[in-house]
Amino acid sequence: MTSDDGEWAGVSSDEFFPRPSVAAPTLPSIAAAAAPRPVLRVADAMGLIVGTIIGAGIFRTPPLVASNANGEGAILFAWALGGALSLVGALCYAELATAYPDAGGDYYFLRRAFGARLAFLFGWARLAVIQTGSIALLAFIVGDYAARLLSFGPRSAALYAALVVVLLTALNVAGIRPGSATQNVLTTAVVFGLLLMVGAGLALAVPGDAPMPATPSGFADGAAFGLSMVFVLLTYGGWNESAYISAEVRPPHGNMVRALVWSILVVTALYLLVNWAYLRALGAAGVAASPTVAADLVQRVAGEKGGRLVSVLIALATITSANGTIFTGGRSAYALGRDFPALAFLGRWSPRPDAPVNALLVQGGIALGLALLGAWTRKGFETMVEYTAPVFWLFLLLTGLSLFTLRYTDPGVRPFRVPLYPITPLLFCATSAYLLYASLVYTGIGALIGVGVLAVGAILLVPLSAGQSDRSAS
C-alpha cells in the first residue's frame, strides 16, 4: 500500500532515492526559486491539447478503418466510439490533474501511487522512448510531405525532419509565451483547413457507392473491429499530454476539466465531419481503396493543385502536433530532474524564458538522434511507431491504475471526481491493456528496441540508488 509520499510496502521511496536536505548543495538554488507558474488560459490549454491530437493520423488512417468496416454507418460508429473512449480517458486524467496539478503529469501521479522506482522508469521512458520517439515520428511525417513540395535529393525527408526538431525546440526554449502563442496560431490554421476540406466534401455530389448486400453494415468479425479501433484510437492519441500543463493553467481545477472535455468534444466533432466528407465525396468503398483519401477529395474540387494543398495542410497539422509534444515533453523531463539529484541539470526551471531549458535541449538532442536513426534505417515513420507504441500503452495503463491506488491511499478532497467510478477508469484501463497487447503483436523489431531501452533504465536504477545512498551518508 502506498502513502501520499509514495511509500510502498512500508518502505519510503526516499530510502531508495533520498531527497537532499535543505542544506545539501545537490540541487541548485535557482531550481528551488524558479518553478512553473499558472499563466495559461483555457484557450491556451485547448490549443495545446487539440493541436497535439490532430496530426497526420486523420489523413492516413480513415482508409485503414474503412477497409475493416462494412458500410458508412460502421465507419462513423468507429470514429464516434473512439471519441467516447478518449473522453473516458480524459475524465480519468481530469481527476488526477486537478487533484495533483504538477508539471510532471503522469510521472507525478505514478510517483505518488507507486513510488520512486516506477516513476523513474516512466521518466526515463518519456525521455528516451515515448516523447522523443514521438517527436522524431512527427518530424519524419513533416519531412515526407515537405520533400514532395521541395526536394533536395534522397535524404530530403531526413533533413527536413532534423530541421523541424531543431526549430521547434528552439522556439520552446525561448519561453512559454512564444511556444503557446505559436501553438494557438497553428491549431487555428489546422482546424480552419479541416473545415474547408469538410466543406469541399459536402459540396460534392454523393457518389454511387454500391451497397454490399451480402454483408450487413457493421464489422466482419471481432478482429476487424479491434483493428479498426486500434487505428481510430491512435488517431485520437495525444490528449493525455494535458497532464503536463496542469501546473501552468489558471486556475488549475475547473479550467483543466473544461479544457480536457471541450478539447475531446471538438476533436470528435472534427473527426466525424471529416470522415462524413470523405464518405460523401468517395463513398465507403472509395475511402477504403484510397491511401491518399484527403488528396483525392480535394483534387475533385481543386484539380492537381489539391494534392499540394493537402500536403501543406498535413505538414502544418503535424508541425502543430510536434510543437505540443515538445512543449509537454520538456515538463516531464524537468520533473524527473527535480526529484533526482543525479539528474538535477534537467530540473532547472529557467525564470527568464519561464521554461525548462535544459530539459528541452536534452529532449531535442535525443529526438534528433532518433531522427538520424530513422534516416539510417530508411523507414523513419515505421521505426518510430514500433519504437514508441508498447512502452506508451504500458505506462498509460499504469496511470489508469494509479487512479484506483490514489483513491485508496489518498481519499482526500478531489476538486473533480470521475463520473461512474469505478466503471469509467476500468474501461480506460481495459482499452489501454488491449492496445498494449495489439502494439506488441503487430509491431516488429522497433518494439524490441524500445522495450530494450526501457530495460536500460531499470539497470540504471542500481548505480543511481547506490550514489544516492553515498550522498545521504555524507
Image (tube, rainbow, N blue to C red):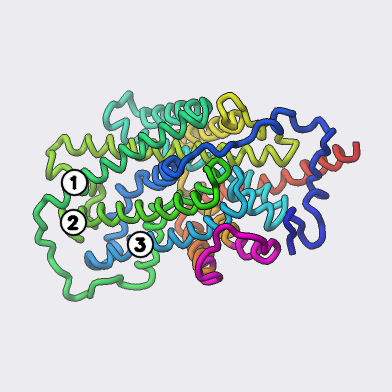
Pick the residue in front: 336 or 133: 336
Q: Is residue 156 above or below residue 294?
A: above
Looking at the image, is mark 3 or mark 2 earlier in the sequence?
3
Q: Is residue 204 above or below residue 350?
A: below
Quadrant for residue 213, please give it: bottom left
Looking at the image, is mark 3 or mark 1 earlier in the sequence?
3
Q: Name the residue furthest right.
A: 474
Q: Quadrant of the N terminus?
A: bottom right
The magenta-colored residue range is 401-425
* Amino acid type at mark 3: Ser
* Amino acid type at mark 1: Asp
Residue at image point 20% right, 61% down: 284
Task: Mark 1: give few (<14), some (14-19) or many (20+) Cα within 10 Å.
Answer: many
* Amino acid type at mark 2: Gly
Q: Quadrant of the C terminus?
A: top right
Q: CB under 8 Å between callouts 3 and 1?
A: no
Disc 1 designates what residue? 296
The numbered mark at residue 286 is: 2
Residue at image point 10% right, 58% down: 207
